[in-house]
Image (cartoon, rainbow, N blue to C red):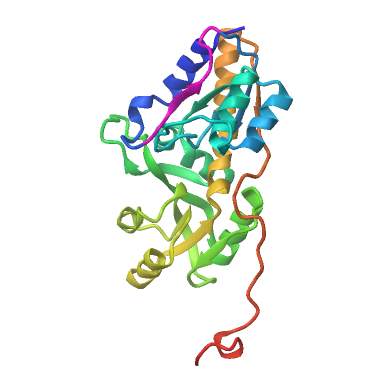
């Protein structure tokens, strides 16, 4: 079986840490370099529920998209929830490795997995990586549908293809407008409106769209917006990443067993649809 250092080297080749944003915290959080690795669990969030799943599975390595310590820390005291995560990992000989913005811009990356989950055809990156001579790396993806769909139909496609969350799918725009081209970006994407408008697409699918940026985007152009849960837009990457490691394991004869967590770690757990209008809810007319 491979050592942890060998598996980490393979993961770093897929998602080089040098390509992460300067503010990001990627790489190995804990783990013994010479320890053998037989099982690997992929997940979006390094929260206690996922760590407990790794323990029950008998995993030697947990790979997550989101960092555990994004802004640094001064303690791993077990009374804190992040400290408890670290203690649980170390006590059970489980390494933790993070691929975040370096996985976002990879080829294939997080948005490729999102496009694949929606059965969209990728034509290129939304924000190309200027250091990539092939022009395939970068943030977000520009995609085409095989056949035009209305916004209503496209939102339903997203709802049926992405993992279920309490939020579901929100859409902004004419429900009957035809969608032929789509920009997608896994995770929070409302900082990309300028690039999306420049791409000239019909719709933008991402997560965490805020009121003011979304409102301004709708006022400035007929761009349709499709807003999914953050976790749901990034979870498809876990399956893609596991398949990439499977391929490496097969080529090198490692015999790794990879697993993808199906645990929903989106923080929102319930949704109650509104049933009243301002004129009937007691609000001023």
Which is nearer the eye, 285 or 18?
A: 285
Q: Nearer the viewer, residue 159 or 120?
A: 159
Is residue 278 depicted above or below 153 in this figure? below
Residue 29 included in the magenta stretch of the image: yes
Residue 176: quadrant of the picture: bottom right
Judged left or right of residue 55, residue 120 is left
**What residue is at 56 percent from the left and 46 percent from the top?**
231
Q: Residue furthest bottom?
A: 285
- Residue 11 at what x, y percent from top left? 48, 21
Q: Report the residue at 33% width, 26% height from top.
A: 18
Q: Residue at x 53, y 30 (%)?
A: 77
Most prominent secondary structure in the magenta stretch? loop
Residue 44 seen in the current view: no
Residue 139 locus on image (x, y percent) = 37, 42
Farthest residue, direction right: 56
Residue 218's place in the image compared with 236, above or below, is below
User: In the visual, does 244 lie left or right of 99?
Assistant: right
**In the rendered view, does 160 fall on the left or right side of 180?**
right
What segment is highlighted magenta in the picture?
Answer: 24-34
Q: Magenta includes 213?
A: no
**Where residue 34 sits in the image (x, y, percent)?**
53, 7
Q: Nearer the viewer, residue 232 or 204?
A: 232
Q: Which residue lies at the image location 61% right of the left edge and 13% below the top edge? A: 37
Vertical side of 86 occupied by 234: above or below: below
């Amino acid at each position: 079986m491979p050592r942890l250092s060998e598996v980490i080297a393979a993961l770093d080749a897929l998602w080089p840490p040098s390509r992460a944003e300067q503010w990001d915290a990627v790489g190995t959080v804990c783990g013994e370099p010479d320890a053998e690795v037989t099982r690997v669990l992929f997940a979006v969030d390094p929260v206690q529920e996922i760590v407990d799943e790794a323990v029950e599975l008998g995993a030697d390595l947990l790979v997550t998209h989101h960092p555990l310590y994004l802004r640094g820390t001064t303690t791993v005291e077990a009374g804190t929830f992040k400290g408890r995560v670290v203690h649980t990992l170390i006590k059970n000989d489980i390494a933790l490795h993070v691929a975040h913005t370096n996985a976002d811009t990879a080829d294939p990356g997080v948005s490729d997995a999102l496009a694949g989950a929606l059965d969209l055809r990728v034509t290129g990156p939304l924000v190309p990586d200027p250091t990539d001579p092939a022009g395939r790396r970068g943030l977000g993806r520009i995609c085409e549908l095989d056949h035009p769909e209305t916004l209503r139909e496209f939102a339903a496609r997203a709802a049926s293809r992405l993992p279920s969350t309490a939020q579901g799918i929100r859409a902004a725009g004419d429900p009957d407008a035809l969608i032929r081209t789509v920009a997608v970006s896994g995770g929070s994407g409302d900082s990309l409106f300028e690039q999306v408008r420049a791409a000239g697409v019909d719709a933008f699918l991402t997560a965490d769209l805020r009121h003011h940026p979304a409102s301004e985007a709708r006022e400035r152009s007929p761009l349709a917006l499709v807003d999914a849960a953050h976790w749901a837009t990034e979870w498809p990457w876990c399956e893609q990443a596991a398949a990439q490691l499977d391929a490496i394991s097969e080529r090198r004869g490692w015999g790794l067993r990879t697993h993808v967590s199906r645990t929903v770690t989106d923080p929102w757990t319930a949704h109650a649809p509104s049933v009243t209008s301002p004129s009937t809810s007691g609000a001023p007319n």
